[in-house]
Image (tube, helix red, strand yellow):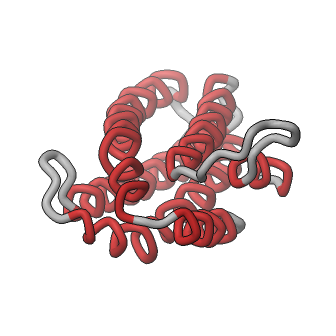
Amino acid sequence: MSHEEKLAISEDAPGTEARAPSFLALLRVHEHLNELFVAHQEALLEQDIARARERLLAYERALLAHMRPEEEILLPVYARAGAIPGGPIELFLGEHRKMREFLGRFHATLAELDAHPADLRRRIIRLFDEQAMFKHLVEHHDLREQNILYPALDRVTTETERRELLRQCLDENQP
């Protein structure tokens, strides 16, 4: 994520009334991640496996850079909110684990496509089918963060603490 994108997330636009920071600003990171994954899939559509692998690696680096501060910084703060229906910490961690597992399978499939290009189009279709399940998981995870995690973090933190935590999360988002 560029320096300008980080500023857009963490600061108010010049000339606007100052607003309290919100963890909902991290939804822009989700949008960036979604674009990176689509770029990977576009390369697959073009049957450019080398470029698809590069773009998947870029997506994975950005996703892990986003998950790391969530797990190490935000979820411990989220614990202050107590038990929230539909949002136990273990659920967020489990979804992160599943995403990592999917990515491992995608990398293995890409290596196989590259090594054995026979029947490439059908095998890419099968990969898209598996990626549809991954995208479904990511979509539900992102909604859970939007509707449960980030609002709870806004409730249990002060404005000063939110600013510092957001800064840390955005700094961590740099590979």
Q: Position of residue 78 (x, y in %)?
A: 32, 65
Please give the count of numbered marks on the rendered protein. 0
Instruction: Give the residue drawn at x 29%, y 57%.
Output: 92
Q: 138 and 163: which one is in front?
A: 163
Task: Classify residue 94 as left or right of residue 156.
Answer: left
Quarter in which the C terminus is drawn? bottom right
Q: 155 and 114: which one is in front?
A: 155
Q: 72 and 165: which one is in front?
A: 165
List the single residue furthest toward the front. 17
Task: Classify residue 14 as left or right of residue 166.
Answer: right
Instruction: Give the residue drawn at x 46%, y 48%.
Output: 106
Q: Is residue 134 visible?
A: no
Reply above or below: 134 against 58: above
Instruction: Give the residue drawn at x 69%, y 69%.
Output: 171
Reply above or below: 73 against 40: below
Q: Is residue 103 visible?
A: yes
Task: Classify residue 123 as left or right of residue 55.
Answer: left
Q: Position of residue 160 (x, y in %)?
A: 58, 69
Reply above or below: 15 against 57: above
Instruction: Give the residue drawn at x 58%, y 46%.
Output: 25
Q: Position of residue 143 (x, y in %)?
A: 36, 36
Q: Position of residue 69 (x, y in %)?
A: 50, 70
